[in-house]
Image (cartoon, rainbow, N blue to C red):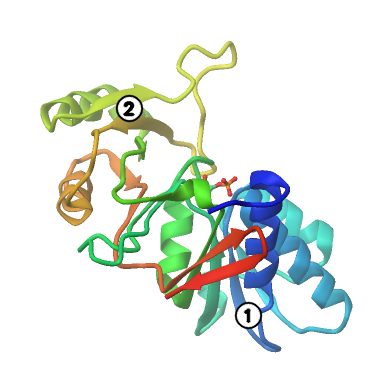
Amino acid sequence: MKTAGGTDAAKRRAGERAAEEVEDGDVVALGTGSTTAYAIEAIGEAVGDGLEVQGIPTSFQSRQLALEVGIPLTDLDAVETVDLAIDGADQVVDDADSPAHGALVKGGGAAHAREKLVDAAAERFVVVADPTKLADALERSVPIEVLPDAHSVVADRLSELGGDPTLRDAERKDGPVVTDNGNLVLDCEFGRIDNPDALAARLSRLPGVVEHGLFVDLADATYVGLEDGVEVRE
Ligand code: 5RP
């Protein structure tokens, strides 16, 4: 699959196409990342043209952008329904014959805990992606948000599960990455993940884990930005 203008143009096409799905009166979950940012900007433009929506941001970053482009904001406690979630992904299983079809790795922006909460609450969850994100199986390292006190203990448990965890930006002068929830992130290599559902269950059982970046059976469709448009994969 080729993308004219490269990955960024593909991200833009996917994000803008997903924004067209937003209808008057919708409550929309606003994901995090560079692809979703295009959707947020397009929704902001539509709001300028009179569309009435409320957005639920999934991170400080998406909240700031939504405010900048004029999207009125709300939160999960204040609404009965979330009509649509638009969010990016770090990797998507694109093999229709795979039992893991549609499974995602998310959390490149360390926002996966709120993203999972809000994306899972939506009536429809649309993933926006460029073709570099598509894969036959998940192989990217899995971001795991952990309580700060738990990072060494959880890292040991992850190694026992066959993973290779690294504290995100541990060597940085300002200290490791801290999430919007005040926690740390372990990025854990598991190699090829043939059964993301089973791994997700094991990760969720570890004390100290706040949320992991495996999203299984949550996405309803993937909008893939291409050279000549957008392919919608349900
Ligand atoms: C943030 C995420 C992002 O959606 C994911 O990292 C994709 O980002 P981008 O659209 O910039 O490639 O999961 O936690």
Q: Which residue is mark 1?
A: 21
| Quarter residue 20 falls in | bottom right
Name the residue located 61 percent from the left edge and 67 percent from the top edge: 230
Q: Secondary structure at mark 2?
A: helix
Instruction: Using residue 65 as the reference point, say whether residue 165 is left or right of it.
Output: left
Quick one: which residue is furthest to the left in this view?
160
Q: Which residue is at the front of the view, 170 or 196?
A: 196
Looking at the picture, how far across and down is residue 190, in whole percent?
23, 34
| Residue 157 position in % (x across, y down) | 16, 29
Amino acid type at mark 1: Glu
Q: Badge 2 is on which residue?
A: 149
Residue at 23 percent across and 30 percent down: it is: 154
In this view of the protein, which residue sits in the foreground, 192 or 123?
Answer: 192
- Categorize mark 1 by other alpha carbons within 10 Å: few (<14), some (14-19), many (20+): few
The x and y percentages for residue 75 are: 58, 69
Which quadrant would the C terminus be assigned to in this image?
Answer: bottom left
Above or below, comparing residue 142 to residue 148 in the picture: below
The circle on residue 159 is none
The span from disc 1 to disc 2 (Cα, nearest Å) is 42 Å
